[in-house]
Amino acid sequence: MSRLSLLPAELRRSLEQRSALKVIAGLMNFDQANVAMVAAAAGRGGADLIDVACDAALVKLAIESSAGVPVCVSAVDPELFPAAVAAGAAMVEIGNYDAFYPQGRLFDAAEVLAITRRTRELLPDVVMSVTVPHVLPLDQQEQLAVDLVAAGADLIQTEGGTSAKPFSAGSLGLIEKAAPTLAASHSISAALQQAECAVPVLCASGLSAVTVPMAIASGAAGVGVGSAVNRLNDELAMTAVVRGLREALGRPVISRV
């Protein structure tokens, strides 16, 4: 039996219907007030999942503020995950790595595989998503994704927003911003299918309401959106963005709050 069966039914259904929406508070975001706003907006806007920094207190805060939206915790240190899972996290995410690139910190395939294997040792029965670093060439991203599934990954996530260099305004600029992660989603989805690895792909980093339908068309089962929501300073504005993303994925907004 797949570990994905351990996920809440609504989240599992969204992945199966290729319309999952994950709202990302940020791997380095330990600001409780901001996380609470993001979580509340996710709940009101109809998100399927909230991704927060790997901290037990933030997990409990996100669950409470969102009125029960499932929580995923993100980190690159496997030893941090068990406490967050004990606090109520429904799944764990290795990555994404965008917050580390400005520091000059890069992750290669060997390190990501090592983190994945250690996480699976610590949490044999917990759903685990792993981000494929966008700094790798696409063919290496494809191979790493296949290797990650063999190492125990239940979902694969893409990234690429920080490498994009959009130079146009409006919708064209939003498409340019999303191009790297869309390309990764397409290539990795195809590689996993060819290798007969039946795991969902989440397309994340640099997405907007304009480009989330493109992510699904590229092969993703869902999307992860962070800065389009968490950079805002107003909960109503955050909620409006989440609702727009939900509608762009072709599903009605069902508020939890």
Image (cartoon, helix red, strand yellow):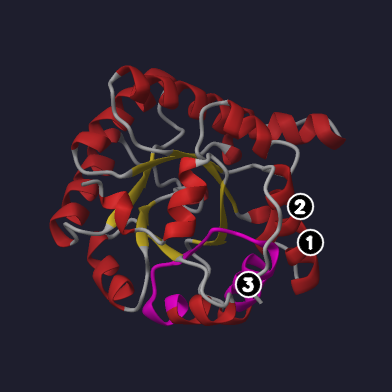
- The image quadrant where one finds the C terminus is bottom right
In the rendered structure, the answer to whether residue 62 lies left or right of residue 121 reads right
Asked if disc 1 and disc 3 are in contact, CB closer than 8 Å, the reply is no
Q: CA distance from mark 2 to mark 1?
A: 6 Å
- For residue 240, the mark is 1
Look at the numbered disc 2 and give the secondary structure of its residue.
Answer: helix
Magenta residue check for 87: no
In this orientation, which residue lies closer to the viewer: 131 or 220? Answer: 220
Region in magenta: 34-59
Can residue 73 be seen by looking at this rendering? yes
Residue 46: x, y in percent? 65, 61
Asked if disc 2 and disc 3 are in contact, CB closer than 8 Å, the reply is no
- Please tell me in which quadrant of the rendered image residue 183 appears: top right
**Three-letter amino acid code at the position of disc 3:** Arg
Residue at (28% x, 34% y) in the render: 109
Residue 55: x, y in percent? 39, 74
Residue placed under numbered mark 3 in the picture: 256
Secondary structure predominantly adopted by residues drawn in magenta: helix
In this orientation, which residue lies closer to the viewer: 74 or 88? Answer: 88
Magenta residue check for 47: yes
Asked if disc 2 and disc 1 are in contact, CB closer than 8 Å, the reply is yes
Residue at (28% x, 66% y) in the render: 81
Q: 109 above or below 114?
A: above
Residue 157: x, y in percent? 44, 41
Residue placed under numbered mark 2 in the picture: 244
**Three-letter amino acid code at the position of disc 1:** Ala
Look at the numbered disc 1 and give the secondary structure of its residue.
Answer: helix
Can residue 164 be seen by looking at this rendering? no
- Please tell me in which quadrant of the rendered image residue 22 appears: bottom right
